[in-house]
């Protein structure tokens, strides 16, 4: 089966999130990628968080792109809002506010870039757990530095980039 990237548009509604999440997961399985149950869950969780943030904060249609790059899945969601997502802390009883923290914990690379008519939020998810993966990068306890609203690089992501550059 082809491993070409997929791209589709959907309306920014809560009902569309579930269908899009399953479409993303189905596309990755359709590329004959062996996904453990844990990795499938992570893929669907990251997809859900990117999509839910766009539905909650944007207007109009959303464009979703999913690509396989080496051992990584790259998920992008383009929406019509120019408000950049911010990492925030959620109280124990809050029903929201954890999406970006979850993405940060699961994806070594993620970010947001402004476009002329909105923004693109993206996340890179490894298809395998690495032995030296950092479970949660938190600036408060010495984790990743969030020095840019445009992108974030966790310690695991920095190690990954160093490893890839040494191979190339």
Image (tube, rainbow, N blue to C red):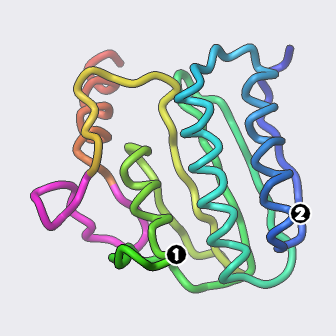
Q: Quadrant of residue 133?
A: top left
Residue identified by numbered label 2: 10
Image quadrant containing the C terminus:
top left
* x and y percentages locating residue 30 in the rendered image: 81, 22
Residue 133 drawn above or below residue 86: above
What is the secondary structure assignment of the residue under circle 2?
strand
Near mark 1 (Cα within 10 A), the count class, few <14, some 14-19 or many ≥20, is few
* x and y percentages locating residue 58 in the rendered image: 72, 82
Q: Main SS type for the magenta part?
A: loop
Residue identified by numbered label 1: 96
The range drawn in magenta is 137-152
Residue 158 drawn above or below residue 98: above
* x and y percentages locating residue 11 in the rendered image: 89, 70
Q: Residue at x 10, y 57 (%)?
A: 142
Q: Residue at x 83, y 41 (%)?
A: 23
Find out whether residue 140 is within the magenta segment: yes
Q: Quadrant of residue 161?
A: top left
Task: Please give the label number shown on residue 24.
Answer: none
What is the secondary structure assignment of the residue under circle 1?
loop
* x and y percentages locating residue 12 in the rendered image: 82, 73
Q: Quadrant of residue 78?
A: bottom right
Camera-side residue of 95 and 10: 95
């Amino acid at each position: 089966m082809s491993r070409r990237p997929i791209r589709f548009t959907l309306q920014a509604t809560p009902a569309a999130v579930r269908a899009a999440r399953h479409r993303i997961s189905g596309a990755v399985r359709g590329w004959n990628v062996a996904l453990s149950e844990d990795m499938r869950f992570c893929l669907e969780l990251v997809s859900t968080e990117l999509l839910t943030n766009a539905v909650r904060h944007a207007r109009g249609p959303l464009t979703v792109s999913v690509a396989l790059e080496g051992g990584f899945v790259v998920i992008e969601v383009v929406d019509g809002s120019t408000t950049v997502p911010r990492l925030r802390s959620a109280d124990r009883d809050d029903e929201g506010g954890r999406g970006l923290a979850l993405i940060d914990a699961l994806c070594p690379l993620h970010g947001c870039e402004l476009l002329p008519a909105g923004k693109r939020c993206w996340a890179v998810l490894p298809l395998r757990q690495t032995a030296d993966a950092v479970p949660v990068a938190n600036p408060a306890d010495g984790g990743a530095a969030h020095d840019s609203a445009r992108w974030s690089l966790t310690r695991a992501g920095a190690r990954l980039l160093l490893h890839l550059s040494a191979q190339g």
